[in-house]
């Protein structure tokens, strides 16, 4: 079939329906095993941890969307990240963006460290700081751009080019952007990971993770690890995720429109000290983001000004839901210091700018005027 553009790929990419029956929707192959015709014969599927047609349809789809060589679906974003980190071995060192997802920090700090995999936090938004950290034991660089929750921008291409010259793998967590807005493999990264729980699923109704590799050698190694560790996504959730991905572009177009409207509103409020949103032209990293992505996303963080109480703010949100997670059709507000980033020690958290007066919003696809009304009300009630 001819190469299609992304809006079409979202609908028809991967495995388009079912060739046996003509069903337009990929069937849910709820099976653990497969009949083998003879001893030692070649079979497309033998056991569902190793391969399942519904999961495979999803894996082919995400590989196409990210323009990689192979895709892998996992039971959560953390299962995807964990499996990718198993590519490294004891004595290796990984550099991670400051502000990476709290769970990524936690698995490195509390689990992988015990097995001798070392990590170091670096401000990857400054490429010269990253370059200073490069020494022979560094085997991987793990970045998020925009990073969570201050939306810090890292130049993915510059990092990838630098990493490549030293034989270091570049891994990008592309959860906040999705391939609709940013394709790290085309910028030179080696591996992309996703919490598909967020925008790709899009409806706050499933937990899933994806990884996509940029070359055949890495694809083979990750296929081995996926089967060996077994943290796979089950057939029903694979189907649900395919269903979510079909509407990714229409959802994101609305997410972007709403987020840009809310960011402009927040900027004008005296109750708001600072707004973090990559779509604002004076945001640090704006130009790099413009170069590597086609939209600013729909996560906005801001700090409440002095004289305004954070508890009162959250208490008076009526439409916007106080909750963990992001990327669903409904707007969510979270308090990074006590929720998503609580696993980072307080001192380090403050150093990173994740202060107690920081609010993170995941802007949904409701009517933007209702969102503004809700924020206006909560901000006015938060005045001390
Ligand atoms: C949520 C999230 C994860 C973890 O994914 P789960 O699906 O919750 O396991 C990883 N990275 C980012 C950026 C996230 O937002």
Image (spheres, rainbow, N blue to C red):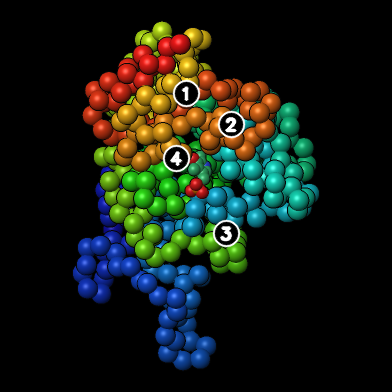
> N-terminal of the two: label 4 or label 3?
3
Is any atom of residue 212 visible in this view?
A: no
> N-terminal of the two: label 4 or label 2?
2
Of residue 158 and residue 304, the one placed in the foreground of this image is 304
> N-terminal of the two: label 1 or label 2?
2
- The answer to which quarter of the image holds residue 314 is top left
Give the residue at mark 3: 222
Is any atom of residue 173 visible in this view?
A: yes
As helix, strand or loop, the secondary structure at mark 1 comes to: helix
Task: Find the distance from the CA under tag 3 to the CA under tag 2.
Answer: 26 Å
Q: Are the residues tagged 1 and 3 within 8 Å (C-beta)?
A: no
Task: Find the distance from the CA under tag 4 to the CA under tag 1.
Answer: 19 Å
Q: Are the residues tagged 3 and 2 within 8 Å (C-beta)?
A: no
Give the residue at mark 2: 99
As helix, strand or loop, the secondary structure at mark 3 comes to: helix
Residue 316 location (% of width, % of height): 37, 24
Task: Find the distance from the CA under tag 4 to the CA under tag 3.
Answer: 27 Å
Mark 3 vs mark 2, foreground winner is 2
Residue 10 location (% of width, % of height): 31, 49
> N-terminal of the two: label 1 or label 3?
3
As helix, strand or loop, the secondary structure at mark 2 comes to: loop
> N-terminal of the two: label 3 or label 2?
2
Mark 4 vs mark 3, foreground winner is 4
Of residue 334 and residue 92, the one placed in the foreground of this image is 334
Mark 4 vs mark 1, foreground winner is 1
When the figure is inspected, residue 39 is found, relative to residue 89, above or below; the finding is below
Quadrant of the snapshot with the N terminus: bottom left
Label 4 CB less than 8 angstroms from ligand 1: yes
What is the crowding at mark 2: few (fewer than 14 residues within 10 Å), some, or many (at least 20)?
A: many
Residue 190 location (% of width, % of height): 56, 46
Of residue 113 and residue 290, the one placed in the foreground of this image is 113
């Amino acid at each position: 079939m001819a190469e299609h553009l992304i809006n079409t790929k979202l609908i028809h990419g991967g495995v388009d329906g079912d060739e046996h029956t003509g069903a337009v929707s990929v069937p849910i192959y709820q099976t653990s095993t497969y009949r083998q015709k003879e001893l030692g014969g070649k079979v497309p599927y033998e056991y569902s941890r190793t391969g399942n047609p519904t999961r495979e349809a999803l894996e082919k789809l995400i590989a196409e969307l990210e323009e990689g060589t192979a895709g892998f679906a996992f039971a959560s974003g953390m299962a995807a990240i964990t499996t990718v980190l198993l590519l490294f071995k004891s004595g290796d060192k990984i550099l991670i963006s400051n502000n990476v997802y709290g769970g990524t920090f936690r698995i490195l700090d509390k689990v992988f460290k015990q097995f001798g995999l070392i990590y170091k936090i670096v401000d990857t938004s400054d490429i010269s700081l990253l370059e200073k950290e490069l020494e022979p034991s560094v085997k991987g660089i793990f970045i998020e751009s925009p990073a969570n929750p201050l939306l810090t921008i890292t130049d993915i291409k510059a990092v990838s080019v630098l990493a490549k010259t030293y034989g270091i793998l570049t891994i990008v967590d592309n959860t906040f952007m999705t391939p609709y807005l940013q394709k790290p493999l085309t910028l030179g990264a080696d591996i992309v990971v996703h919490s598909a729980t967020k925008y790709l699923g899009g409806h706050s109704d499933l937990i899933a993770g994806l990884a996509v590799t940029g070359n055949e050698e890495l694809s083979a190694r990750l296929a081995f690890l996926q089967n060996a560790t077994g943290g796979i996504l089950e057939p029903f959730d694979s189907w649900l995720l395919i269903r979510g991905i079909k509407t990714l572009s229409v959802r994101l177009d609305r997410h972007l429109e709403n987020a840009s409207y809310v960011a402009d509103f927040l900027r004008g409020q005296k109750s708001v000290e600072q707004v973090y949103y990559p779509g604002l032209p004076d945001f640090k990293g704006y130009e790099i983001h413009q170069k590597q992505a086609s939209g600013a996303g729909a996560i906005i963080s801001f700090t409440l000004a002095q004289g305004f109480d954070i508890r009162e703010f959250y208490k008076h949100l009526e439409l916007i839901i106080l909750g963990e997670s992001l990327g669903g059709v409904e707007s969510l507000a979270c308090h990074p210091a006590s929720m998503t980033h609580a696993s980072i020690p307080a001192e380090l958290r403050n150093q990173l700018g994740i202060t107690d007066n920081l609010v993170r919003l995941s802007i949904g696809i409701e009517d933007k005027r209702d969102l503004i009304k809700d924020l206006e009300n909560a901000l006015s009630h938060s005045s001390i």
